[in-house]
Amino acid sequence: RSIGTVLYIAPEQLLGSLNQKSSTDVYSCGIVVFEMLTGKLPFLPGSIVEMWQLQSEGLKKLPSEIRPELSPAIDNILLKALAYEPEERFQDVLDF
C-alpha cells in the first residue's frame, strides 16, 4: 500500500504499483531537493490524474531556469532523479 503526499510521490506510487524499489524514494528526494533549491515544486496539479500527466511529461522548468546561478549539472541530476521510469533514475539514494 502506498502512502504519501501526492506532490511528493513517484509515478509508480501514484498508480498503486506493488513493485516499488529504492528508486521510488529517489524520486521523492528529488522533489524535495528541487523545492529546496528553487523554492518551488516541480509539479502543481489540480488533481491526482493531472499529477500523473505532469509527471509523465517531465520537468517543464529546469532548476537553472528558476535560479540561473545553479549549475546545469544540478539540472541533469534532478532530471535523472525525477525520471518517469524507475529504471532511468538513480537506483538508490546514495547514488543520488
Image (cartoon, rainbow, N blue to C red):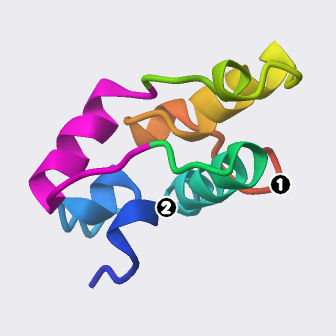
Q: Quadrant of the C terminus?
A: top right
Is 68 displayed left or right of 39 in the figure?
Answer: right
Identify the mark nearer the N-term, 2 or 1: 2
Describe the element under mark 1 as helix, strand or loop.
Answer: loop
Residue under pointer 1: 94
Q: In this view, does 13 lie above or below 27?
A: below
Q: In this view, does 9 lie above or below 94?
A: below
What is the crowding at mark 2: few (fewer than 14 residues within 10 Å), some, or many (at least 20)?
few
58 in the magenta segment: yes
Q: Is residue 75 above or below residue 95?
A: above
Q: Where is residue 1 in the image (x, y as percent from the top left)?
A: 27, 85
Mark 2 to mark 1 CA distance (whole Å): 14 Å
Describe the element under mark 2 as helix, strand or loop.
Answer: loop
Amino acid on which the number 2 mark rests in the picture: Lys
Is 25 displayed left or right of 16 in the figure?
Answer: right
Amino acid on which the number 1 mark rests in the picture: Leu
* Magenta segment boundaries in residue numbering: 43-59
Find residue 84 and report its image quarter: top left
Q: Is residue 63 above or below residue 21?
A: above
Q: Can residue 20 be seen in this view?
A: no
Q: Where is residue 82 in the image (x, y as percent from the top left)?
A: 52, 39
Residue 21, labelled with which disc? 2
Which of these two is toward me, 58 or 26? 58
The answer to whether mark 2 and mark 1 are in CB contact below 8 A is no
What is the crowding at mark 1: few (fewer than 14 residues within 10 Å), some, or many (at least 20)?
few
Is 75 displayed left or right of 7 in the figure?
Answer: right
Which of these two is toward me, 24 or 18? 24
